Image (cartoon, grey):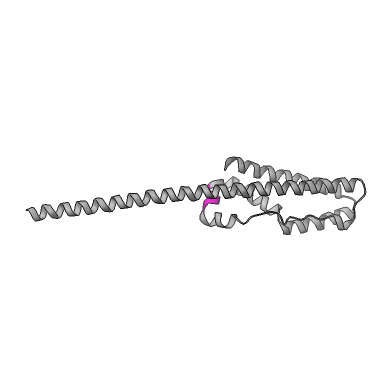
Amino acid sequence: MEIVFSGFWSAFWLFLGVVAGAGIQHWLTQVQFQKHQKNARLVLETEIELNLIEAETIAGRIRFLKERVGAGQIEDADLFLNMQGFHYSAIGPLVNSGHFHSMLGSGGVKKYVEFMRFFNNNNANWLSSALVAEHEKGLSMAFLDWMLGKCEVHSSGLKLISKHT
């Protein structure tokens, strides 16, 4: 009887050790996940801040172009936008880790993607070409107003995201 009783306690302590190990492993995983999520939040906040500063630079360029067009002191060659200063390098790793979607939710992701679609090099090329075409037709002021409105809409969407991250 003592052998059966001893086997029971051995199995019991083994089981308790496995459960305790699993519990500790789960706790460590949660701590590490929270640390990663905190770092991801800081990276995203930094990227948003940099991109908002760059969006304001673009809006300033558009306002400058409006002044020059209004004064009739601009050449077609001056009607360009450069959007190379925007940074989206953190998005890929944040999407792959799942933090991007979990931090922003569907509405925040939509706003960020809309911001990225407007403020990128390909769109800058298209906007610059369209601006030259509109300027040749004498409609560049309206187009610049539209562009400035888009800058404000997308920037305000990103500001909302930064308040909720």
Q: Position of residue 45 (x, y in %)?
A: 60, 46
Residue 138 on image: x %, y %: 90, 51
Image position, residue 34 (x, y; %): 46, 47
Which of the 4 image quadrants contains residue 70? top right
Residue at image coords 14%, 55%: 7
In front: 141, or 96? 96
Outermost left residue: 1
Q: Residue furthest right?
A: 72
For the point 24% across and 50% down, the residue is: 16
Look at the magenta stretch and give its main secondary structure: helix
Residue 67 location (% of width, % of height):
87, 45
Q: What's the magenta region?
A: 98-102
Position of 61 with respect to 108 (left or right) is right
Query: Viewed as shown, does residue 145 lie left or right of 22?
Result: right
Inspect the magenta stretch and tell me whether residue 77 lies in it: no
Q: Nearer the viewer, residue 147 or 87?
A: 87
Q: Is residue 10 left or right of residue 36?
A: left
Give the position of the C terminus as an image quadrant.
Answer: top right
133 w.r.t. 159: above or below: below
Q: Residue at x 26, y 52 (%)?
A: 17
